[in-house]
Amino acid sequence: MRIAGSNRLNSQGNRGWLPPLQQIIHVLQFRPEAVIRAPAPQEEIANDGLTNLPPTSMRQGLGLVVLTALIAGLLPFIINWTIAGRAGSALPLAQLARSPLLRADQFTEAPLFLQPWVEAVRTIAGIQPWLPGWLAAGLSSLGVWLNQPLQWLNFWLVYGLGILIVGKLFGATTTLQNFYAATSYAYVPLILTILRPIPYLGALAVIIGLVWTFILYVRIVQLVTGLEFGRTVLSVLLPGALAALVTLVTAGALVASFLRLGLGA
């Protein structure tokens, strides 16, 4: 696998925590082949008239995912701080206080065995933080914001590993480092999710970002693994389908356990 069209590392090749902006633009324009090369038996690959871009390292891929997640979470962080600050409480307590679960009409309609839990949630939501309200709101909102890059990194690494394993079963020849370096570019369109708190526009932006990311991800996986399109799509979807199946089975078992507990079975 070759990322950037030359065998030689230039002076800027693996320095820093982010790939050059030019490479990111190429990928966002649905031209990942300008940055990512399919596996080839030859050591040197023709440039095809493209700029001789430096290879992308896994460190740069990690930095790209983290930066994208931070940008995507900036507006939600500001809004969360504002909401929690007005409530004079930490963000989780402010969110609990705004929850429909705490409305009196819904509380009276809740099943009998759930009402003690609803009452407990109401009590917790009314607890005031030890810190000043604006500070508790800011720190808790900051924690949620900084946790987003960790969640994205976890998905990038864990789900990516599942895709690579399936791809290897289908005959992919790429390495782990090259796979992660390449697929990090697919996370850039998720910057659009920064608009998610905005009514209507946010939902549209999230849908566009997800579709854009999925299309790029499939194309990048196909380039970096050298698989045909059908096997590439299966490699991308199978780990998610398996995870969803395990989640449904686990959730079903938990629901059944709670129902038996509530009915005294």
Image (cartoon, rainbow, N blue to C red):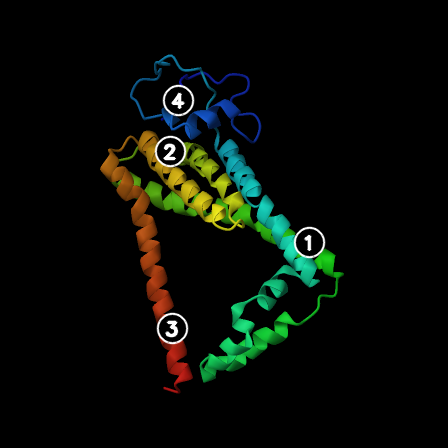
Q: Residue 34 carries which label?
A: 4
Q: Which of marks 1 and 2 is nearer the N terminus?
A: 1
- Residue 89 visible in the snapshot: no
Dot 4 surroundings within 10 Å: few (below 14), some, or many (20 or more)?
Answer: many
Q: Which amino acid does label 3 sit on?
A: Val
Q: Is mark 1 on a helix, strand or loop?
A: helix
The mark closer to the camera, 3 or 2, is 3
Q: Looking at the image, which is closer to me, 29 or 63?
A: 29
Tell me: 66 left or right of 250.
right
Dot 2 surroundings within 10 Å: few (below 14), some, or many (20 or more)?
Answer: few
Dots 3 and 2: beta carbons under 8 Å? no
Q: Marks 1 and 2, how far apart in space?
A: 42 Å
Quadrant of residue 253 in the image?
Answer: bottom left
Q: Marks 3 and 2, how far apart in space?
A: 41 Å
Quadrant of residue 127 in the image?
Answer: bottom right
Q: Mark 2 points at which residue?
A: 175
Q: Name the residue under label 3.
A: 255
Q: What residue type is labelled 4?
A: Ala
Q: Marks 1 and 4, how far apart in space?
A: 42 Å
Q: Earlier in the sequence, mark 3 or mark 4?
A: 4
Q: Marks 4 and 2, how far apart in space?
A: 19 Å
Q: Looking at the image, which is closer to me, 56 or 143?
A: 143
> At which x and y percent is residue 43?
34, 17
Q: What element carries label 3?
A: helix
